[in-house]
């Protein structure tokens, strides 16, 4: 057939995707991709609907059941999804419209739900579109009603069943291998945590967790059944989570306040942890939610919370004439804090369908105003604790200010290590021989790495997001950049001009990032920055890259970790040929269990490392060294045309780019 010309382009070339076909064709537009994070997002959409019923006061109990590694069932005792005929679509029930048509549901009318996590009206339909099989069972109007779907298509009419006095909705769905691949499987730990989080975010609602025992392994440390119930919401959860840890605040700062114009409310809980010696703890965290949706990238509700707490503490310092309080920042205040802020809002605006960042600017003002008076009253009611907290934060501020100046820090004794950045989890061994510093991408991965490490010889330094690109920024920006200056301090040997090998604090500096594009970007930035700031670190053989595995392949009771698609295929067609194989794809370090991270990536006896090398500093290597300097400057500099030229010239050598 001859190719069409521009003149033959007509109405017949225009495709109209009907029903849920757009979701199956471009799932990334609706759930952010088809990876593990994406398929674990699906049950949250169904659970959010059940939680919305509970928040609205119609449901008291929700059950989350992991049936097998691809099938999950979520039920509630709410009103039950509507089953009557939809007035705009004769012959179709409202239930079918909800599950088979985008932008349908009860979330657009504030008379139905005052606040909800499913504002976009695509949750149930998207889950149905990306599921191999979906069964919805409704108890309503004195009967059970059932309807079935497959890959977005309705495969059965709404069937009226036996009589019942029950009420509620049950949704069971199975992941579609056509969308997510045969290796797609739910992780019990993730579903368990999801159910627990929804429970403490919906005070007074019971959420029951059930899991088939065949899916649980000893290292998961999970029960087969558990009921989560938090009558005081986030305060109960934070109390439970921090009860056995040293706390600077004997009593949690917690509460709930309504927003103006009946637009929503904020709930919160806050405490500050220390270690056994009274220094800042590594166990701090900040979790935020909007309409029970985890906003892992924060947003305006976090900003308002941080501002209120920081301003209140500074105001208290001013009242007691503590001049140092003027220097503290929100980072100082929250360095060792454990905080949860949960807002319920009528008209939330999120960045992206997966709702990971709240963007309503007015919410920042509402949250700040809501917390200001309760926080100032909390501090005033216990001057002894308030003054101790202020001094604690002042010390953190002083340590931060010192890290702005490049200085040499030899390894300190345990009593003097408080001068180092508080997020550093240092090793116990004195002297450099055999010690390792892991620079880890993200707080979550940093927490896992701290559990997986050998405390005697391995130190952990978590980073928060992408670091400064020192090659494309001025020396003034470097001087003001907290992350890079902290790394310089922690490594201890100074910078290029004043390098002192004898003051190096660790024998190996190991960059450990996720096996994805962002992780590679962060690793590239760090390598380029070290090359520019302290090339001796590379020349002297101290800088390494970790090699976390891509897959865990399990056949029966045997599990093997592999580093590439080629190794995976060789294993499936070789040693595991003919066996039922389960494949887990590791997208992030924080998703690995501590024992997995230790075994594969951190244990010197079982891991692999890549040493970062440069041309030798000799007469013969001078030309190569100059080429390296030029290449790094061009690729990491401000002019994108150099990167474009490099990519176009070298793209033909790329066989497989796993992103």
Image (tube, rainbow, N blue to C red):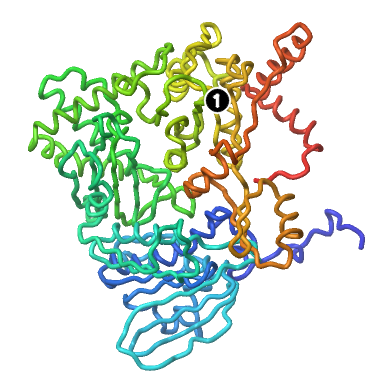
Query: Where on the picture, by quarter, is residue 191?
Result: bottom left
Judge by depth and name the residue closer to the eye, 278 or 356: 278
Residue at far right of view: 2
The residue at the point 53 percent across, 73 percent down is: 100
The residue at the point 61 percent across, 22 percent down is: 638
Judge by depth and name the residue closer to the eye, 421 or 62: 421
Where does residue 257 sit, x and y in percent of width and height?
A: 19, 50
Query: Where on the picture, by quarter, is residue 529?
Result: top right
109 lies above or below 475: below
Query: Where on the picture, by quarter, is residue 81?
Result: bottom left
Q: Is residue 326 left or right of residue 44?
A: left
| Secondary structure at numbered mark 1 | strand
Where does residue 58 sit, x and y in percent of width and height?
A: 27, 72
The residue at the point 57 percent across, 38 percent down is: 519
Q: Is residue 470 left or right of residue 286?
A: right
Residue that mark 1 sits on = 508
Circle 1 residues within 10 Å: few <14, some 14–19, many ≥20:
many
The residue at the point 74 percent across, 45 percent down is: 656
253 lies above or below 577: above
Where does residue 515 sit, x and y in percent of width and height?
A: 60, 42
459 lies above or below 657: above
Asked whether residue 106 appears in the rendered view, the answer is: no
Where does residue 256 sit, x and y in percent of width and height?
A: 20, 51
Q: Is residue 587 left or right of residue 284?
A: right
């Amino acid at each position: 057939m001859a190719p069409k010309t521009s003149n033959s382009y007509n109405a017949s070339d225009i495709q109209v995707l009907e029903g849920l076909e757009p979701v199956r064709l471009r799932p990334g537009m609706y759930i952010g991709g088809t990876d593990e994070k994406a398929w674990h997002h699906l049950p949250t959409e169904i659970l959010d609907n059940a939680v919305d019923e509970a928040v609205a006061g119609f449901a008291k109990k929700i059950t989350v059941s992991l049936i097998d590694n691809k099938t999950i069932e979520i039920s509630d005792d709410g009103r039950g999804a509507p089953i009557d005929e939809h007035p705009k679509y004769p012959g179709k029930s409202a239930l079918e419209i909800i599950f088979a048509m985008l932008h349908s549901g009860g979330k657009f009318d504030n008379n139905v739900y005052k606040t909800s996590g499913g504002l976009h009206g695509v949750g149930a339909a998207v889950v149905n579109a990306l599921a191999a099989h979906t069964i919805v069972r409704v108890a309503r109007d004195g009967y059970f009603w059932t309807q079935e779907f497959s890959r977005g298509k309705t495969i059965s009419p709404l069937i009226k069943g036996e009589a019942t006095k029950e009420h509620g909705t049950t949704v069971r769905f199975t992941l579609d291998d056509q969308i997510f691949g045969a290796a797609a499987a739910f992780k019990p730990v993730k579903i368990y945590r999801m159910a627990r989080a929804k429970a403490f975010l919906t005070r007074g609602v019971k959420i029951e967790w059930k899991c088939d025992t065949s899916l649980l392994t000893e290292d998961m440390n999970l029960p087969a059944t558990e009921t989560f119930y938090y009558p005081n919401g986030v305060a109960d959860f934070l109390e439970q989570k921090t009860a056995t840890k040293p706390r600077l605040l004997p009593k949690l700062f917690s509460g709930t306040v309504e927003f103006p114009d009946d637009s929503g409310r904020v709930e919160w809980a806050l405490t500050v942890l220390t270690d056994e010696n009274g220094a800042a703890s590594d166990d701090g965290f900040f979790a935020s939610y909007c309409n029970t949706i985890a906003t892992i990238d924060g947003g305006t509700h976090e900003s308002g919370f941080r501002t209120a707490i920081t301003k209140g503490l500074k105001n208290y310092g001013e009242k007691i004439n503590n001049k140092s309080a003027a220097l503290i920042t929100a980072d100082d205040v929250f360095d060792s804090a454990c905080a949860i802020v949960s807002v319920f809002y009528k008209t939330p605006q999120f960045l992206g369908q997966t709702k990971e960042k709240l963007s309503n600017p007015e919410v920042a003002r509402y949250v700040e105003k809501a917390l200001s008076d309760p926080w100032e009253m909390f501090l005033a009611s216990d001057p002894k604790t308030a003054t101790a907290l202020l001094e604690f934060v002042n010390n953190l501020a002083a340590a931060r200010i010192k890290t702005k100046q490049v200085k040499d820090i030899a390894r300190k004794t345990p009593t003097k290590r408080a001068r180092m950045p508080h997020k550093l989890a240092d090793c116990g061994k004195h002297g450099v021989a055999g010690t390792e510093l892991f620079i880890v991408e993200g707080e979550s991965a940093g927490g896992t790495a701290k559990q997986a490490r050998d405390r005697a010889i391995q130190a952990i330094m978590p980073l928060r997001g992408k670091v400064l690109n020192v090659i494309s920024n001025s020396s003034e920006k470097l001087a003001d950049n907290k992350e890079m200056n902290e790394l310089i301090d922690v490594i201890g040997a100074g910078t290029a001009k004043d390098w002192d090998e004898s003051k190096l604090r660790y024998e190996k500096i190991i960059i450990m990032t996720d096996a994805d594009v962002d992780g590679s970007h962060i690793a590239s930035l760090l390598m380029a920055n070290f090359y520019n700031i302290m090339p001796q670190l590379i020349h002297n053989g101290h800088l390494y890259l970790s090699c976390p595995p891509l897959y865990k392949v399990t056949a029966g009771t045997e599990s093997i970790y592999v580093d590439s698609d080629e190794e995976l295929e060789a294993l499936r067609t070789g040693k595991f040929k003919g066996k039922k194989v389960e494949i887990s794809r590791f997208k992030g370090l924080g998703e690995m269990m501590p024992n997995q991270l230790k075994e594969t990536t951190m244990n010197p006896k079982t891991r692999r490392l890549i040493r970062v090398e440069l041309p030798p500093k000799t007469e013969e290597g001078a030309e190569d060294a100059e080429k390296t300097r030029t290449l790094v400057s061009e690729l990491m500099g401000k002019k994108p045309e150099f990167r474009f030229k490099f990519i176009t010239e070298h793209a033909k050598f790329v066989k497989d780019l796993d992103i």
